[in-house]
Amino acid sequence: MIAEVADVVGGATGAARAAAGFTLIEAAVVAGLAAILAAVALPIYNTYVVRGCVHAAQAAMLAQAASFGQYALDHRKYPKACVSPQALTAFSLSCRSDNTASPPTYTITATGSGAAAGFAFTLDASGAKNTVAVPPGWTLTRNCWVSSAAGDCAFP
């Protein structure tokens, strides 16, 4: 009789209540664990996103250098601007050349923006790779392209 009244009023007893759902404490524990995981995982994920952007910019610079070399073979001089630069999400490429120098030279520069703000890399006609700037928290290593926050070099 009491169980029938409880069912009619909307309450539940014993096993019926246990199968009804989660308690507020259980939901709070799950939310807390999710917050802890997010606090640990998001900075690591952001670091990988930045490193991916850096590697994409460095690869685009190498491709641009190959285009400059091909242009020089065809025209006996370097182009004055970038040749069909790749579209990059977090970097912009700029190119300049000096065909009056002996030997002629060029410099390709990648400058970071957005997630990669603070980065700047150069590549010149001799193949010298240089990191010009890095954001706070990254170690600046000259005479190579930095590929990690520790200052490790990529493409030595």
Image: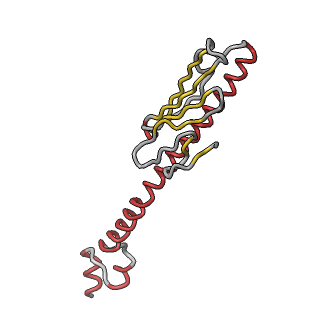
Residue appearing at x 27%, y 88% in the figure = 1
Left or right of 120, for residue 86: right
Q: Is residue 76 above or below residue 42?
A: above
Q: Is residue 102 above or below residue 33?
A: above
Residue 24 quadrant: bottom left
Looking at the picture, the colour scheme in use is secondary structure
Residue appearing at x 59%, y 35% in the figure = 129
Q: What x and y, as percent, mark residue 36?
A: 38, 64
Residue placed most toward the observer, 7 or 145: 145
Q: What x and y, as percent, mark residue 133?
A: 46, 37
Task: Please state the total of marks drawn on the protein image.
Answer: 0
Left or right of 128, for residue 121: left
Q: What x and y, as percent, mark residue 67?
A: 68, 24
Residue placed most toward the observer, 117 or 149: 149
Residue appearing at x 24%, y 75% in the figure = 9
What is the residue that sits farthest to the front in this orientation?
Answer: 102
Q: What x and y, as percent, mark residue 56?
A: 58, 38
Residue placed most toward the observer, 51 or 14: 51
Q: Quadrant of the C terminus?
A: top right
